[in-house]
Amino acid sequence: MTALPRVLGSTHAGGAAPTATDRLLSVLAAFDHEHPALCLTDISRRAGLSLTTAHRLVGALTEWGALERDESGVYHVGLRLWEIAALAPRGLALRQIALPYLEDLYEATHENVQLAVRDGSDVVYIEWLSGRSAVGVHIRVGARWPLHATGVGLALLAHGDPEFREEYCAGELASFTPYTITDPARLRRELAEVRRTGVAVSDRQITEDALSVAAPVRTAGGSVAAAVSIVVPHADAQVPVLVPAVRVAARGISRALGWLPERV
């Protein structure tokens, strides 16, 4: 699912030479969920930098705490970045506000419960609760999936900027199962239905054994900042039963963020 990071060290906007910032960011972009630990050679290759440049930048990042080097000489993302990321209002802060409502939803169902935000054309998961008997999902905190292929993604896309939504629908729609929505017209109809009902149902879009029901989370001003969902086995899914539970969780989080229904 995760592609090789864009090589910031080789290209730059307008064809200009990459800046020092570009090169520094390319080192950090070399790390992802599939590559959480890298040696210097791998960092150099994945960042598109010479070994000498990579060595210099990695040294600076390690000294600052953005990277850490273990006893075997392999590098990992450092705690300093975690400390800074925890300040993101759509990250840890949102998760802390939402967690009690997510836990209530989990206790009521003992199924997969997720909280996600939009980042560009992807949905990024910032919390996930799962039980031993819950259906298996390809999700972890920090994971990314295309918006159209998940329940939370459909909820976020449906309530997002109309210009962005149209641009997304007109673009390439990746397929993961025979049921994944890949037709732009069908996606537009699906998003209109999400706006009409206030919930999104994603049936076997990522795996053929799972169905998710999602609802938007609103801020004090009424804009959609996140989405909450529950993922259950497709064979046992009772959508009419799941919808009210997910709506209650989404509304609870929204109210905790200062949202009032009459403002929408």
Image (cartoon, grey):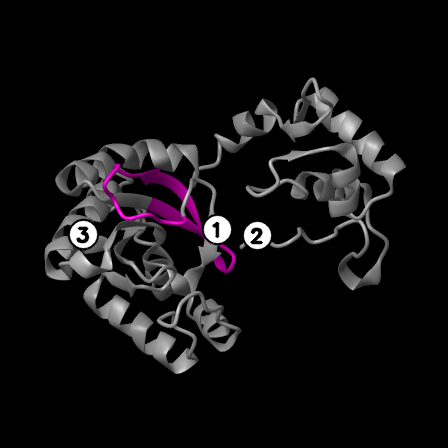
Q: Residues within 10 Å of mark 1 (few under 14, many from 20)?
A: many
Numbered mark located on residue 144 in the image: 1
The residue at 84%/30% (across/down) is 56
Q: Position of residue 156 (x, y in %)?
A: 37, 58
Is 131 part of what is drawn in magenta?
Answer: yes
Sequence-wise first label, 3 or 1: 1
Given contact means CB atoms under 8 Å apart, are the residues at marks 2 and 3 in contact? no
Circle nearer the viewer, 1 or 2: 2
The residue at 52%/74% (across/down) is 171
Total marks shown come to 3
Given contact means CB atoms under 8 Å apart, are the residues at marks 3 and 1 in contact? no
Q: Position of residue 13 (x, y in %)?
A: 76, 59
**Label 1, label 2: how far apart the Cα atoms are:** 8 Å
Q: Residues within 10 Å of mark 3 (few under 14, many from 20)?
A: many
Reading the image, the residue beneath label 2 is 2
The residue at 23%/41% (across/down) is 133
Circle nearer the viewer, 3 or 1: 1
Sequence-wise first label, 1 or 2: 2
SS of the residue at dot 2? loop
Circle nearer the viewer, 2 or 3: 2
**Label 2, label 3: how far apart the Cα atoms are:** 31 Å
What's the amino acid at mark 1? Arg
Q: Position of residue 160 (x, y in %)?
A: 39, 62
Q: Position of residue 182 (x, y in %)?
A: 43, 75
Relative to 185, residue 53 above or below: above
What's the amino acid at mark 3? Arg
